[in-house]
Image (cartoon, rainbow, N blue to C red):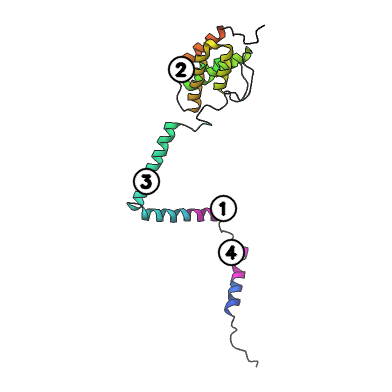
Amino acid sequence: MMRTGGPVTTGRDAAREAAEHELSKPVYHQNDPGLLQRAMNRFWEWVGELFDRASGSAPGGTLGLIAIAVLVALAVTALWWRLGTPRRTADGAGDLFDEGIRSAADHRAAAEAHAAAGHWTEAVQERMRAVVRALEERTLLDPRPGRTADEAAAEASASLPAHTAGLRAAARTFDDVTYGARPGTPGAYASLRTLDEALSRTKPQLTGPRS
C-alpha cells in the first residue's frame, strides 16, 4: 500500500498570483462598467467630496451652501439679462453688414417688416444697412467689405456735407443697438427712415479738383 504524503501547501505569493490570474478572465468582467462609465462615476464621486467639504465650511452647512449657489445663479442671470449676449465689440468696431450681399431695397423691405412686427433693434440695423447700400449703389461709397457704420458715415459726409450730423447720429444709433446692448426704439427707426429718404433726394457735392 502506497503511503500518501501530507496536504499540499501553496505559498502566499503563488496563491495571490493564481487568484489574480483567475479573476482576470473575461468571464468575470462581462458586467463591469465601461471606461466612460467608470470615469463618470469617479467624477461624481469627486463632485460629492467637493460638495461635502464646501458644505462643512459654509455658514449653515449644506443648506447655506445651496442658498449661496442660488444667489450666485440669480446674480449671473440678472447680469446676463441686463447686459444681453456679449457682442463682438462695445465700441462699434464691427462690420456693418452681416453675411451675404443684398440691395438697398431688400434692406428697406426687411427693415419695414421688422418695424411692423415691433422688432425695433432689427429694424434700425436693417435701415442703416439700407442707407449705406444705397450710397454704394449711387457710387457715393465704394463697396468695401469690413466697413463700419462710423467709417461709412465719415466717408459719405464728404459728398453729402449737409447730412453729416444725421449720418453720424445714425452710425451711433446703429452701434448702440448692435454692440452697446441698447434696444432700438420707434423714434430711432423713424429718424433713420427720414435720413434714408432725405439722402435719396439729395444731390452729392462734387469733391473733385477744380479747373
Q: Which mark is residue 188?
A: 2
The residue identified by callout 1 is 36
Query: Residue shown at 39%/42% (left/top)?
Result: 72
- Disc number lying in front (1 or 4): 1
Mark earlier in primary sequence (4, 2): 4
> Considering only order in the chain, which callout, 3 or 4, is on the residue closer to the N terminus?
4
Q: Rounded to the nearest whole Å, what is the CA distance between mark 1 and mark 3?
A: 32 Å
Question: Looking at numbered disc 3 in the image, what kind of residue is underneath it?
Answer: Ile
Identify the residue under disc 4. 28
Q: Nearer the viewer, residue 30 or 145?
A: 145
Q: Residue at x 51, y 12 (%)?
A: 195
> Secondary structure under badge 1?
helix
Choose top left, top right, bottom left or bottom right for residue 30. bottom right
Dominant SS type (magenta) = helix
Badge number at residue 68? 3
**Label 4 amino acid?**
Tyr
Do callouts 1 and 3 mark residues in contact (Cβ within 8 Å)? no
Q: CA distance from mark 3 to mark 2?
A: 42 Å
Q: Amino acid at mark 1?
A: Leu
- First-in-chain label (2 vs 1): 1
Q: Is residue 23 visible?
A: yes
User: Which mark sits nearer the N-terminus, 1 or 4?
Assistant: 4
C-alpha gap between disc 1 and disc 4: 19 Å
Specify the segment rendered in magenta: 20-45
Q: Nearer the viewer, mark 1 or mark 3?
A: 3
Neighbour tally class for label 4: few under 14, some 14-19, many 20 plus, Cα within 10 Å: few
Foreground: 63 or 98?
98
Quadrant containing the N terminus is bottom right
Side of 53 where 160 appears, left or right: right
